[in-house]
């Protein structure tokens, strides 16, 4: 067991971030994406220029090694300012050592600071580790998109999960 160093991503982390996400995407078919959507250069530019009130790029390091990455963003229209969404990966060698938990807790702190009240995410129904981490972090399934993904030729349901900061839900004013 080790204590990861969790901090915001810097431009110089871009190469490790792209490599880690691509490695996990290749190893874990239940992630649902084939590869990281940005190049090393565009990730570096993004980390240098993104508005921290809208975008959160969190890294978890063990020494000099990147072992976890979480990306979150919040809505930018007035109607969605209170909502964020996120994705997370942890290197296989560092799993079940609280890296995921530490990243989720840091993300929740950011959400509180910027005024997000509803935390959302998407996870494949077949992703047992992801579902367990999110349930452990207080998320509940609020919708199922049937057969949303096709993984290795098989249809897989997508679960939309959410957790509220403070009171929330479908109450009307
Ligand atoms: C899901 C993932 C991020 C978890 O990261 P992690 O660092 O291993 O998680 P943690 O060690 O912080 O686990 C915290 C809790 O989550 C639950 N959990 C995590 N992985 C689990 C697993 N494989 N089986 C059962 N429970 C699990 C447990 O409750 C765990 O607490 P415990 O170890 O005290 O029992 C990691 O497995 C991963 O990167 N998977 C591939 C990418 C992915 O699926 N991302 C999510 C979709 S966006």
Image: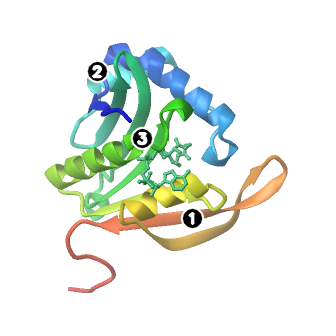
Residue located at (31% from left, 39% from top): 55
Within 10 angstroms of label 1, few (less than 14), some, or many (20 or more) residues? many
Q: Quadrant of residue 134?
A: bottom left
The residue pinned by badge 1 equals 159
Query: What colour scheme was applied to this rendering of the protein?
Result: rainbow
Neighbourhood count class around disc 2 (C-alpha, 10 Å): few under 14, some 14–19, many 20 upward: few
Tell me what residue is drawn at x 62 percent, y 35 percent: 25
Extreme residue toward the bottom, this view? 172
Which percent across, then down, holds residue 163? Answer: 35, 66
Closer to viewer: mark 2 or mark 3: 3
The quadrant where residue 82 appears: bottom left
Which of the labelled discs sits on residue 170, or is there none? none
Q: Which residue is mark 3?
A: 97
Image coordinates of residue 65 in percent, x first then y, are 41, 19
In the image, the residue with mark 3 has its CB under 8 Å from the nearest atom of ligand 1: yes
Q: Is residue 49 above or below residue 25?
A: above
Above or below residue 15? Residue 51 is below
- Mark 3 residue crowding within 10 angstroms, few (<14) / some (14–19) / many (20+): some
The residue that label 2 is drawn on is 48
């Amino acid at each position: 067991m080790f204590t990861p160093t969790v901090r915001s991503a810097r431009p110089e982390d871009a190469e490790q971030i792209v490599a880690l996400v691509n490695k996990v995407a290749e190893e874990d078919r239940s992630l649902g994406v084939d590869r990281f959507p940005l190049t090393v250069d565009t990730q570096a530019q993004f980390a240098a220029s993104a508005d921290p009130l809208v975008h959160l790029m969190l890294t978890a390091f063990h020494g000099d090694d990147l072992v976890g990455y979480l990306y979150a963003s919040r809505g930018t229209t007035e109607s969605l300012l209170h909502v964020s969404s996120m994705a997370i990966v942890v290197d296989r060698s560092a799993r079940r050592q609280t890296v995921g938990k530490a990243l989720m807790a840091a993300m929740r702190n950011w959400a509180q600071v910027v005024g997000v009240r509803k935390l959302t995410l998407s996870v494949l129904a077949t992703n047992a580790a992801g579902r367990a981490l999110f349930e452990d972090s207080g998320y509940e399934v609020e919708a199922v998109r049937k057969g949303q993904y096709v993984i290795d030729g098989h249809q897989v349901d997508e679960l939309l999960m959410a957790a509220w900061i403070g009171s929330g839900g479908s109450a009307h004013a």
